[in-house]
Image: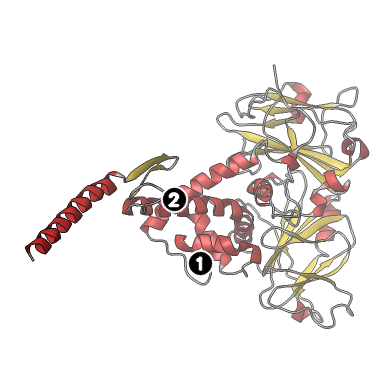
Amino acid sequence: MRTKIMRTKTIVAVATLTALVFGSAAMAQEQTLDTRIGKLSFTHDFANGYPTDETQQKLLDEMDFQRATQAYIWSIPIVGFAQWEYANTHDLGAVNGQIVYAKGYDALREGLTANTTTPYSFSWTDLTKEPWIVEIPKGTIRGAAHNIWQIGLSPMTEPGKYLFVGPENKVPANANHDEYIVVKSDSNNVMQVLRLMSEDPKEQLAILKQIKIYPYSERNNPKPRGYITPDGRRYRMWQPRGMEYWKLLSSIINREPVQERDRFFMAMLKPLGIEKGKPFKPNASQTKILKEAVLVGEAMAKANDFANPRMESAFYVKDSHWEYATTAKPDQRFENYDDLDGRAKWLYEALTNNMAMHGQTTGKGQIYMASYKDADDDWLDGGQNYILHLPAKVPAKTFWAFNVYDVSSRTPILNDTRLAGRSSRMKLLVNADGSADMYTGPDKPAGDKAKNWIQTVPGKGWFTYFRLYSPEKAFLDKSWVLPDIEKLK
């Protein structure tokens, strides 16, 4: 009996000693790793341990932050369009189906990369309750309709009655019999953007007044909503910053069906307080993350947009600082992926995307060339004077336009002259050989050179679009090449 008791005491002592030794070893094995997001600590080593409470919270917060920055890039198209719709309805007071006719610098000052040398007409139709009809008359019109994600739904260059049907409604049974051009949309809100191409202001207005927009229920007795003009009212058509961005995203998500391809992003937004069917009321922790993420997200959008060497679809010619601005396909799809970065690049600085805007691949419509750097590979700066030498016979059958934009808002540059664009439809100074020199900078050139000048502002970055309407063979086969912008010596 004594022997058994002694054995028991020995076993207990050994067990206690083992626990103390190995317990201390376990504590000593807690591992802390240095990573790009800071120190991460784990019980035991990384492979065998759990994240400490502090590390777990850090990682969850980092997940939310990273997802919010990527959600910013993902949501650029829908927030851009939602802001445009808000500008139409709240800032300008346009009703559903009413055209906003904008012409000239003052009317287009707040439009993302608007061409101030040509007039626009744009209208929103909310298809939630019923289909809407847009009647396009004969005339020189270029345009298209887009869903809320800025995906081109249909060109609108041919005259006829376009019947827009939303995702919650069926195409009327007699639509084909009535010879409608049926456009089925996967979003409730649709934007029609029409450009009146005539050079004659009277003809422009005559065509505008013939465009009729009304709901399907009025098909037998149409009551077109007509048009309005900005008339000096300020309206912003570019994405807001700060918490307003997320507020607008939440609002439009609650008004639109969720696309199948976006379901994972909806899951990422949920822990951040943005969820379909629920109001946007972020708590203090969510607000802190969202405020930082919207800043970093836009910083990433800038890096992705301006002279991004990874953007293959932007390539023009070797060693050129010009690039094709329209980097996203109209349907935003490639064979094995959707064009997340390409559409973010284009739609961070612009609005709408349709086949007519890809003349570099179709040989028709328009071509949009963008430049953010000069011939010395320096960013374009508002305090520097520059020259762009245009060789003779610019290969644009209809006309060409050269516009300057603020980097901050990506809208026509705000300057004292209230002029942000020059075009071949203006009275420019043309050299004896048919070439033309375009000037940008803070200092007005002497004499007739001022006819070709656009004023820039010191302390601000700027970029430019060179548009070619109806591109010709010389541009498409690159026998005519757009030269780089150079510093004026």
Q: Is residue 388 above or below residue 231?
A: above
How many numbered marks are there? Answer: 2
Instruction: Report helix, strand or loop for mark 2.
Output: helix
Q: Is residue 233 visible?
A: no
In the image, residue 145 sits, relative to residue 435, either above or below, namely below
The x and y percentages for residue 20 are 20, 50
One can see residue 387 in this view = yes
State the residue lying farthest toward the top.
Answer: 489
Determine whether, in the image, residue 3 is placed left or right of residue 226.
left
Q: Which x, y percent locates residue 349?
A: 65, 46
Q: Based on the displayed image, in which of its 4 quarters is residue 324 positioned? A: top right
Query: What mark, if any, has residue 289 been given in the picture?
Result: none
Q: Disc 1 marks which amino acid? A: Glu
The structure residue drawn at horizontal position 84% and vertical position 30%, both measured from the top left corner, is 481
Q: Is residue 255 left or right of residue 52?
A: right
**407 and 225: which is toward the camera:** 407
In the rendering, at what x and y percent does residue 101 appear?
Answer: 73, 57
| Secondary structure category for the residue under label 1 | loop
Question: Which label belongs to residue 275?
Answer: 1
Residue at x-position 91% and y-position 40%: 472
Give neighbour class at mark 1: few <14, some 14-19, many 20+ (Cα, 10 Å). Answer: some
- The residue where tag 2 is placed is 62
Marks 1/2: CA–CA distance? 19 Å
Type of amino acid at the residue the image marks with label 2: Glu
Badge 2: how crowded within 10 Å, few (<14), some, or many (20+)? Answer: some
**The C terminus sits in image quarter:** top right
Instruction: Please tell me which residue lies in front, 301 or 386.
Output: 301
- Sequence-wise, which precedes: disc 1 or disc 2? 2
Q: Position of residue 339 (x, y in %)?
A: 69, 52
